[in-house]
Amino acid sequence: MKIFDRYLADVFVRCWLNVNLVLAGLLSFLELAKQLDDVGTGRFSSGDALLYVALTLPGRMIELAPPSALLGSIIALGLLAKNHELIALRACGISVQRVGWAFAKPAVLTLLALLLGLQFIVPYLEQTAWTRRETALAESGTILPRGGFWARDGHRFINLRTGRGSGIQSVDIYEFDSSGKLATHIFAQEAHIGANGSWDLRDVRQIVITDQASSIRNMPQLVLSDLLTRKQAAVLALPPQTLSLSELYSIIVNLRQSGQNPGRYLLALWQKLTLPLMTAAMIMISLPFVCGSMRSASLGWLIMVGAIVGVAFFFLNQILGYTGLILQVSPAWTTLIPALSVLAGGFVLTRKIV
């Protein structure tokens, strides 16, 4: 049985990866066309557009894993049936459910490994892509390799870390006088951007330097209304989809403690966590879809219908998630229920296959 499992897993993984690369490449081409529309705005060039698409490609491939798993399993099953291998396997006593498990096992294991990528690799690439793009478009400052941000406002220079939602880490503000001498240095452990554009600095140390002496003042809080412009601040507000799993969880906890709505971050977290379950559901629904129709439909027809179903389910799942935010329904329900429903439906239909 292990030989059969390895063979089925190999056929499925090859089909799945090929479909995933095709879909990701198609969406990357469309994304490139979209980014090229912004070439010439600020300092944004065609090279920046290509780099943005390249850096966001790994995340796009992971996001497309469920619909590509559906298409990949349909193609794999269709090839097995066309070569009469599926009939031979079933004649050997291998059930359709066993075939589905042979497909799902490498897919889920691969996605569980990719969750590590969603924690450590993909967020860094997507955050770099986002900040580079927004900085070039807004001409608002300089993004350093590790996420540091420099901006200038007259005689004031601002250095801070890349933002996580509405929070920013380690802010340094240097103010110079008209002669070019450093007059004030403000350091804050944390900063929050308010709805009205004001900046709320926490754990502040202010150093005032004069010709005679310097003074140090520690303050628990300091509010500045004109620290950065809205364009500059927009660079720091990273979208939830670019954050890692631990960053999303940390922001959700902080927002709840401060009485704010963490809906967008909850949705992004649950969408990432349910990727393995969604992939397994897509594979399960492909079994009755193909095995129950091979005698009456061609492989090309099944692939076309499977593509429509996969893409439709992908977009409907996105729409359902954001609709849940509007209706204030927990993202746990709007992400888990569709996946569990498809998984259960596929399981019930698969058991009816003779």
Image (cartoon, grey):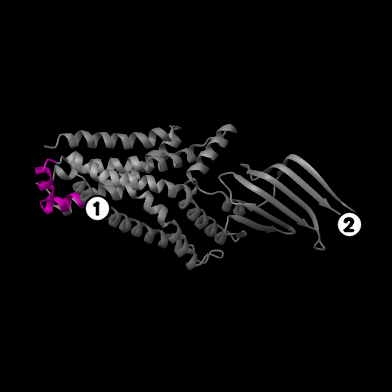
Image quarter in which the C terminus is found: top left
Q: Is residue 98 above or below residue 236?
A: above
Q: Nearer the viewer, mark 2 or mark 1?
A: 1
Rendering coords of residue 283 (x, y %):
26, 44
> Is residue 311 among what the camera can see?
no
Q: Classify 10 Å Cα crowding around label 2: few (below 14), some (14-19), many (20 and above).
A: few
- Mark with earlier residue (2, 1): 1
Res 10 label = 1
Q: Secondary structure at mark 2?
A: loop
Residue 289 among those drawn in magenta: no
Disc 2 residue type?
Asp
Marks 2/1 in contact by CB < 8 Å: the verdict is: no
> Quick one: 33 or 250, which is closer to the camera?
250
User: Which residue is most to the right?
Assistant: 212
Query: Which residue extends farthest front?
Result: 2
In 3D space, how far apart are the residues under numbered discs 2 and 1 (Cα atoms)?
74 Å
Image-based side of 165 in relation to 340, left or right? right
Q: According to the image, label 2 marks what residue? A: 211
Number of numbered callouts drawn: 2
> Crowding at label 1, few (<14), some or many (≥20) Cα neighbours within 10 Å?
some
* Residue 140, percent from left and from top: 61, 59
Image quadrant holding the N terminus, namely: top left
**Type of amino acid at the residue the image marks with label 1:** Asp
> Which secondary structure is most common in the magenta stretch?
helix
The answer to whether 247 is drawn above or below residue 20 in the figure is: above
Span colored in magenta: 74-93
Q: Is residue 89 magenta?
A: yes
Residue 195 horizontal side relative to residue 323, left or right: right
